[in-house]
Amino acid sequence: MHYRIERRRGVAAYQQIVEQTKRALRTGALRVGDRLPTAREVAETSAVNPNTTLKAYRELEREGIVELRQGVGTFIVQAPERPVAGAGAALIAELSAWLDRASRAGLDPSDVREMVEHALAEREGTTLARTGNTEEPKEARP
């Protein structure tokens, strides 16, 4: 598991770790019994303070998703329910094919993220208004 912390997102780093762990469980990238990276490993790969990772892991422990085993590691003990059982693998395959097409079309990861965010915003009935380096949702006009 590799965590990607987006500082400009306006969401605390520990919360991003919690969200990404849950997402990995829902998509099947993590399974019950898997060991999460140590706080030191996350600090080295994601440039966050080890205490930030520990805070995220404690939150996941409170929710019953992980178990912290002193001297051994942090392990997944329960996965949140998936929205649609079995759909994750098919959706990931479709997304992977789409990402291949986007790459061949010359889009870089930031272009892809922006497209996804725009599509999600449209789906929620909003548009993104850019203000400097931040994005704020704004009501869509009829």
Image: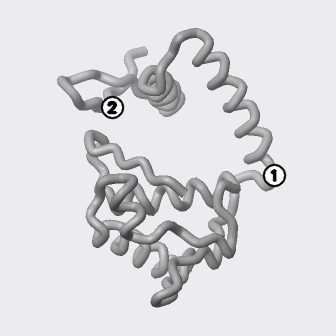
Q: Which of 70 and 29 is in front in this view?
A: 70
- Amino acid type of the residue tagged 1 in the rendering: Gly
Judging from the image, the colouring scheme is one colour
Mark yes or no: residue 111 visible.
yes
Q: What residue does disc 2 label?
A: 137
Tell me which amino acid carries mark 2: Pro
Asked whether the viewer can see residue 122, the reply is no
Mark 1, Cα crowd under 10 Å, few <14 / some 14-19 / many 20+, is few
In space, the residues marked 1 and 2 are separated at their CA atoms by 32 Å
**Looking at this rendering, what residue extends furthest in the bottom direction?**
70
The reply, left or right, for residue 79 in relation to residue 108 is: right
Instruction: Look at the image and tell me in which quarter the N terminus lies.
Output: bottom right
Residue 86: which numbered mark, if any? 1
Relative to 136, say whether 21 is above or below: below
Residue 73's place in the image compared with 97, above or below, is below
x 41%, y 64%: residue: 41
Occupied quadrant, residue 45: bottom left
Quadrant where the image shows the C terminus: top left
Where is residue 92 shown, x and y percent of the image?
71, 39
**Where is residue 76 drawn, in percent x and y?**
60, 74
**Residue 82 falls in which quadrant of the image?**
bottom right
Q: 134 or 47, which is in the foreground?
A: 47
- Numbered disc 2: secondary structure: strand
Which residue corresponds to the image point at 48% horizontal and 79% vertical from the top-left? 61
**In percent of the image, x 54 and y 83: which residue is there?**
67
Q: Residues within 10 Å of mark 2 (few under 14, many from 20)?
A: few
Question: Any mark on residue 39, and which?
Answer: none
Q: Which of marks 1 and 2 is nearer the N terminus?
A: 1
Mark 1 residue element: loop
Q: Position of residue 70 (x, y in %)?
A: 46, 90
Residue sticking out furthest to the left: 132
Seen in the image, is 28 located left or right of residue 125? right
